[in-house]
Amino acid sequence: MSQNLGLTRLAYSRVWHHISAIAPHPTLSTKVAPAEITPPSMGRLASRIAMILMGKHKPIWDPSTDCGDYVVVTNCARLHITGRKYWQKKYYRHSTKPGQLKSLTMDELMGKQGGSEVLRRAVSGMLPKNRLRDKRLARLKVFEGDAHPYKPNLVRFGGKVVGTQGWDAMVESIRETDKKRL
């Protein structure tokens, strides 16, 4: 007898999520007043992305299986970074030879490789350090601007991409027509 209930193949299917690094977000913002809602800071954004990549938002989540989704992040050139991390945070690398410890500050790294690499490193640090980490990071697609080639893959509800302006009104209209139909 099978131990699975329901449509497990559908539960393991991967969905494409779109996140804009500069769009104001009510739940990830540090401000409470509706007029002062800011874009999510880099840490809050990275932790949310890590949760989606691991699949912790799904009811079938298991730490040993890779059931996460794809994430497309745009507008990383203008990440919202709080405090003085932009000038003080350092990234280290070492070649294992004596005297070869190299360090970069965040502003130098953003100048050389852009905000996408800064966000990728933040998300990488929030994922568990196991053999699934590289597979999960491969599903993260990060772009400096607004353009990306994954627009046809994004989740749509009633023809509108989820998260864009007006998609919640589309959801309500579809729910109302379903109530009338039933």
Image (tube, helix red, strand yellow):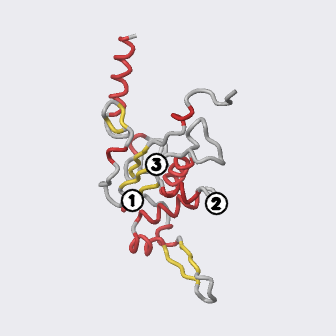
* Image position, residue 26 (x, y; %): 44, 42
- For marks 3 and 2, give the CA distance: 19 Å
The residue at which mark 1 appears reads as 76
> In the image, what residue type sits under mark 1?
Cys
Query: Which SS class for mark 1?
Result: helix
Residue 177 falls left or right of residue 95: left
**Mark nearer the N terminus (1 vs 2):** 1
- For marks 3 and 1, give the CA distance: 17 Å
Number of the front mark, 3 or 1: 3
Question: Which residue is depicted at the point 54% across and 35% down?
Answer: 9
The number of discs equals 3
Query: Which SS class for mark 3?
Result: strand
The disc placed on residue 122 is none
Query: Which SS class for mark 2?
Result: loop
Question: Which residue is depicted at the point 45% across and 65% down?
Answer: 117
Circle 1 packing at 10 Å, graded few (<14), some (14-19), many (20+), is: many
- CB-based contact (under 8 Å), mark 3 and mark 1: no
The disc placed on residue 129 is 2
In the displayed structure, 50 sits above or below 8; it is below
